[in-house]
Image (cartoon, rainbow, N blue to C red):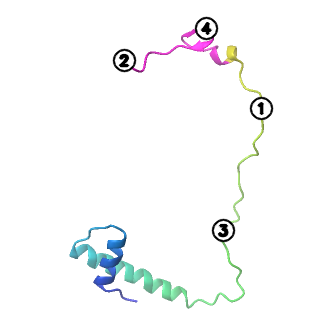
Amino acid sequence: MALTQQEVAHVAHLARLSLDSTELELMRSQLSGILEYIELLQEVDVEGIPPTAQVTGLATVTRLDSVNAGLTREQALANAPDQRDGMFRVKAVFEL
């Protein structure tokens, strides 16, 4: 299915793309090729093939959320280079 430059210009306008005539011709050629390939794929007999969203059989590798004990204040501050009153002490971020 060959597209016209006007059709490609319309799609480019909808996508808010500013294309010159050379780019329009390149896009026309590439999009036409994609549509021709889709037409070819539509000729494949898929009767009896169930719809598939994932073909690789991947499974999720995430773990379930679980509540665990956190660090105590002393553990969190154990390696702090500078601390005061149970808090990290850092250089000022904003100048006054």
- Marks 1/4: CA–CA distance: 26 Å
Q: Does the magenta stretch include residue 91?
A: yes
Q: In which quarter of the view is residue 86 placed? A: top right
* Residue 44 on image: x %, y %: 59, 89
Q: Residues within 10 Å of mark 2 (few under 14, many from 20)?
A: few
Which quadrant: the N terminus?
bottom left
The residue to which callout 4 is attached is 85
The magenta segment: 76-96
As displayed, is residue 37 above or below residue 68? below
The residue to which callout 1 is attached is 68
Image-based side of 52 in relation to 84, left or right: right
Residue type, mark 4 in image: Asp
- Marks 2/4: CA–CA distance: 23 Å
Residue type, mark 1 in image: Asn
Q: Is mark 1 on a helix, strand or loop?
A: loop
Mark sitting earlier along the chain (3/1): 3
Q: In which quarter of the view is residue 71 placed? A: top right
| Magenta stretch, overall SS | loop
Mark sitting earlier along the chain (1/2): 1
